Image (cartoon, grey):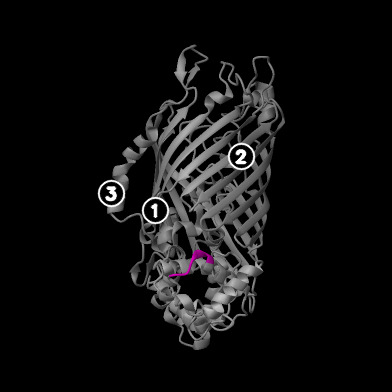
Amino acid sequence: MAAWKIVKALAPAVLVMLAGGWIGHAGAVPSYARQTGQECIACHVSFPELTPYGRYFKLTGYTIGKTSFSSEGMNYLPLAMMAQASVTNTRNNNTTDPNTGETVSVNQRNNGIVFCCASIFLASKVNDYIGGFVQWTYNHLATTADGTLGGHSGIDNTDLRIIGKYSGEGAAEPDLIFGATLHNNPTVQDVWNSTPAFGFPYTTSPLASTPAAATLIDGGLAQQVAGLGGYVFWKKTLYGEVSFYKTADGAFSILRQGQDIHTDGGVAALKGYNPYWRFAYSQDWGANSIMVGTYGMVVDRYPSNLDTSTPTDRFRDVAIDAQYQYITDPHTFTAQITYIDEKQSYNASFPVTAATGAGIGAGPTPANPTDKLHTLKAKATYYHDRKYGGTLAYFSTTGSADSGLYGMDPNGNAMKPDSSGYIIELDYLPIQNIRLMFQYIAFNKFNGASTNFDGNGRNARDNNTAFLNVWVAF
Amino acid sequence: MNHKHVALVAMLLVGAVTAVGAQNNPAEIQKAAEEKAVNLCSTCHGPRGISTSPEFPILAAQRKGYLEAQIDAFRKKARAEKDAHDFMWGIAGNLDDAIIGGIAAYYASQPPARGRSDDPALVAKGKELFDKGLPERGIPACMACHGEDAAGIADFPRLAGQHAKYVGKQLNYIQTLVRAAPVMHGIVKDLTPAEIQAVAIYVQSK
C-alpha cells in the first residue's frame, strides 16, 4: 500500500521527464552517460557499485568520451539530478521520554510519504587529463537546531582529478595509470565498493534510528575535509594511493560549503595534514573480478571544532577489505566485505574530562584514555538482467566499554558501543534511471545491548526498520 | 563564493576544448588508433583484442574490413542490439574514419586467440554443421563464407576462437532481426537452439 502511495506521488514527475525525453534513452541519462554515449550499466552494476569498466573510467579521471563544450559548441549539458522519496516504518515507534515519562514517537514521520532529498551534479570531462564531479544536495529532512525536521542544502560528495597514462613500447594495455585527486570525503575517491563512502547500504532511511558509534573513516569526516592525494594503478593489478586530509578551510572551504562551521560540535577541525593510505590487488578473469586490499588513516582531531588552541585526540583506522564480482548477461553476482579497526587515543579529551568532568567544548567525554572500535560489514547481491536485485548484508560494531562515551547500564556498568544486525534489500529498476527499493534492517544489538539499551525498556529489535524508496536520476 | 571557488567550479563548467591536432600522416594516424586500442578498447576487449569475459567479443585477428564495417555500424546506430546500444554506440560515435581504419588494422594484425573446448561431442556436431551445412533443409555450410578453418574470408568475419556465448547471442539477434544482417538471416533463421550452441562451441574450439 505504502509502495503504491510512493509510486502515485512520483508518477507525475516521472511522466513529465519521460515526455520531455529526459530519461529512457542513452542521450538523456545522467551526465557521464551523455559524455560517453554509454548506458549506466557500462559503469555500474547498479548505482553506485562500479563494474571493472566503471573503475577504469573513474581512475582515468572521468575522461572517456566528449567534453561538454568543444569548438563546435555544447555537446551535452554537464549536469545531472537525482531525487528520492520514501516511506519508513519503525517496528516500535513509541518510546518513553526519560524526562517527562510521556510516550513519544521515535520517528516523526512514521509510515508517511516523505520527499527526502535531491541532488544536482556538475559532472564532466574537462579535457583528456582532467575531470570530476561536484554534488550539491538538498536535504528536506535535516535536523534543525530545535530538533525538528527542516530543509537544508550543502555540498555533498566531490571528486576532481588530474590523470596520466603510460604504456611502454608495444604494450597491450596501459602499464601505468596515475593521477591526483581533490575530494571531500575519505574513500569517496576509491573505486571498489567495499570502502565506506560508496559501500552498502547505498541508501538508508533518512528517518530511522541508527547506531551511535561509527569509525571516523566511515563517514565521520564526510563533506568536512579537503583531501588531496596521488595514486597509481600498475598493469590493472596493483593499486596504491596516499592522500592527506586537512580542515576544509580557506581556499578549500567550498568542499564543506553549506555545512555547520559555527556551532560547537559542527564539522570536524583537524590538525595539519592527516595521512590516508590505500593498497589493493585486483585481478579480472573471464566474467570474474576480485580485489583484496587495505586502507586506513591517522587523524589528529581537535575535540572542539571552535578551539584549535587545544591538544588533539588521535584516531587511527586500519581496514582490510575484499570484493568479488561476476558480471554476465543476465546474471550478476557481487560481494563485498570490510573490517575496520579503530584506536581512539583521547590525548586531549581524557585528561580534561578526568579533571573537570566535562570535555573540551562539545567534544567527547571519554572515561578511558584509549578506546577501540571495530566494524565489520559484508554483503552479497544478485541482479537478474540488471533489473531485479536482491541483497543480503550483515553488519557489526564492537568496542571498548566506556561510560563517558556510551553511558551506564541499569546495573551501573559502563556500556559498549556494540550494534549488529542484518539487511535484506530488494530492488527493481524498470529503467536504469529509476530504482524502486524495499529494505529491511533488523538489529540484534543496538547501542550496546539487545534489550533495554536505553534504560527505558527499549529493545534493539524495536528499531527494526522497513524502508520503501523511489530513486530517480536524470 | 570567492574568486578561488569560481575558478574551481569553472574548471568543470567551461570544459577546456580538447583540440586534438589533425593527423594527416598515416603513421601518426596508426599510432593514435593503437593508443585508442591500448588505452580504451582493451578495457573490455582485452589485451591485443583477446577478451576473457564472454560478454565481450574477441577482436584479435578479425578481418579488417569486417571490423571497420561493424564499428561504422555502431557509429551510425545501424547495429542496435542491446550490447551495441549500451556500450558501443557511445564509443564508436567519437571515432572518425581514419581512426576506425587504424583500430581495425591493429586488431587484424594481432595473433588469434587459441581455441577452447571441453565438449568433444558438441564440437563434432558443430563441425558437421559448419563444414557441410544442412542440405536437406537448405542451410549452406558456414565454411563457404567463413573459411575452412573459420578464419574468415575477405570481409566475412573470423569466427575461430570467438567466445561461444557471443557467437550464440549474435546468431539469436540475427535470427530475430534484432541485428540486421539480411544474408545471414536467410541462412540461420531455421537453426534450432541446439544447432546454434553446437556451431558456437565448434568455432570457439578452433
The residue at which mark 3 appears reads as A16
Could you say where residue A13 lies in the image, as x and y percent from the top left? Answer: 30, 45
Q: Quadrant of residue B97?
A: bottom left
The residue at which mark 1 appears reads as A80
Dot 3: within a 10 Å radius of its alpha carbon, few (fewer than 14), some, or many (20 or more) residues?
few
Residue type, numbered disc 2: Leu
* Residue A316 seen anywhere in this rendered image of the structure: no
Q: Residue at x 64, y 62 (%)?
A: A285
The residue at which mark 2 appears reads as A216
Q: Quadrant of residue A363?
A: top right
* Residue A324 seen anywhere in this rendered image of the structure: yes
Query: Are discs 3 and 1 both within one chain?
Result: yes
SS at mark 3 in the image: helix
Q: Which is more N-terminal, label 3 or label 2?
A: 3
Q: Nearer the viewer, mark 3 or mark 1?
A: 3
Per the picture, the main secondary structure of the magenta-coloured stretch is: loop
Q: Nearer the viewer, residue B125 or A91?
A: B125
Cα gap from disc 3 to disc 1, whole angstroms:
16 Å
Q: Residue at x 55, y 71 (%)?
A: B199
Q: Which residues are magenta?
A: B190-194
Could you say where residue A259 lies in the image, as x and y percent from the top left? Answer: 47, 40
Residue type, numbered disc 3: Val
Q: Residue at x 64, y 15 (%)?
A: A410
Residue type, numbered disc 1: Ala
**Which residue occupies the extreme front position in the image?**
B136
Q: Which is more N-terminal, label 1 or label 3?
A: 3
Q: Is residue A436 above or below residue B80?
A: above
**Which residue occupies the extreme top position in the image?**
A101
Could you say where residue B173 lies in the image, as x and y percent from the top left? Answer: 44, 67
Chain bearing tag 2 is A
